[in-house]
Amino acid sequence: MSSTPLRDFLEIPYAQLEELNLNAKAQRLNRVPLDTVQEERMKYLTDEARIKAVTVCFTDLEGRLHMLDYDKKFLLKSADNLTFDGSSVRGFSAQRESDLRLGIDWHAFYWLPADVFGPGKVLVFGDVLERNGSPYPADMRAKLKHYSQALYDQDGTQCNAANEIEGFIFNGRDAERRYYETGQFEFVSTGGYYHSLPGDPLRLFIDTAAEVQRAMGFQNEKDHPEVAPAQFEMNYGHTEASIAADQVQLYKLICRQTAARFDMTASFLPKPVTGVNGNGMHTNLSVSRQGKNLFWDANGEEQISAFAWNFVDRILSSGEQVCLVFNSSVNSYRRLDPHFEAPNQIKVSPIDRGAMIRIPIGNEKSARIEVRSIAPDANPYMAIYTMLKTGLEGPLADYSAELRTQKRFLSDNIYDAIEKFSRSEFLKSALGEDIAQKFAELKMASAERCPKALGTRIKRAEVMFHHEVQNQYLWSQF
């Protein structure tokens, strides 16, 4: 009997993966022309016989990541003519106009750890296109990319972001999808902040997921258990805004895939368990021009510039209207509870963690603002685009300086947030009126399947019909 392996698929050591992914990231940051990158990637795929498939990703209007695997040889022949059924994706095309196209964003190309994602695969993000090849309006990733590029083309302005994404680890696979049967989640550990022994289930998960992130070019900084039992956070460096948004989707994918390998579930529900802190996705933002951080001023208030304060004031002026974009599920309004360090006040502060925006300690390189009232289930492309668009161009209240410390509160339920979002003429203009309306309708559809009054206990419906958890089978049984 022959001992020769029947399959010879690509498997790359982690150190080499990190080098490959960091080089690809540098090409993207340096804005190497797309034609050059496309030619390089297609030649690589052609020459590397050990690759069997290419995973192409896109994100729907609510923020769910979708993945399609294309046979490598087929993709190389048909990269300019990839289509999919948009009517099967919530928030995308209607059944009568179902076909949409996928364009390959060759800049956003990732080599994958074979032990986590399987051998012989690479991953690339796609642009959702209309039938005629024009950008699809509901593709928030394309909108963020276009906005960021337009600012750069104008005068070298670059928008930077880094997300601090919290999650929970629960025992058992598919714990969220089984919640309608069990009505509860089981923590893998009950330690506290920074308290997890080497080798315990939570630490094992964190160590493994962090290794994968490093291999995929995240440029990690620190990782640790969070305040609540079985809660985690893994931090990585800031980067250009559209890359940062892609990394949010990859972070959640990596965590879910890693947890599944250990028969556990990584959950990014904002508040999956009553009585403990919820999950946030604090988003750090800065704007630079020709390499200079425009948010830094050594002599400014809190050592940030007048430009940065204007950015903050514009977000605070629209705080009520943008709340739905940052907190887009029924469950996310449980997190905005002041008893659990919740950032539910529309104000800014260097120290008050109940403020919507915090000013972290920084220097010329790291000066930034931190938007705290955002949940990890938000569409990262829509959220970061909205933050940037609002901070740079949003309406500015006449009394904006007073808003910085005024005691105003974000919505405490999704109905109120939908109403205020729907009244915003600025957001209709920024997102597109049809897209803003479609987003509000999707949020209302989920809300209407849940109890109107939150109460104190997590309800099955808010998990079952959550946009990152629900499946067609459960949705159709309602």
Image (cartoon, rainbow, N blue to C red):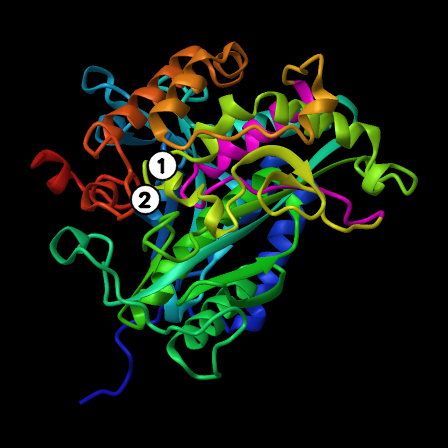
Q: Where is residue 97 in the image (x, y as percent from the top left)?
A: 24, 16
Residue at 56% over, 65% down: 214
User: Residue at the right extreme?
Assistant: 299
Residue at 41% over, 73% down: 202
Would you say residue 475 is visible in this rendering?
Answer: yes
Q: Residue 346 lies in what quarter of the image?
A: top right
What stretch of residues is rendered in magenta? 364-393
Q: Position of residue 29 (x, y in %)?
A: 67, 44
User: Depth check: 112 or 48 in front?
Assistant: 112
Asked if residue 435 is positioned above or below residue 183 in the image, the reply reads: above
The reply, left or right, for residue 270 in relation to residue 362 is left
Q: Name the residue under label 1.
A: 78
Amino acid type, label 2: Phe
Q: Residue 136 lies in what quarter of the image?
A: top left
**Secondary structure found at label 2:** helix
Q: Position of residue 362 (x, y in %)?
A: 79, 50
> Quick one: quadrant of the N terminus?
bottom left
Q: Mark 2 points at which residue?
A: 74
User: Depth check: 341 or 292 in front?
Assistant: 341
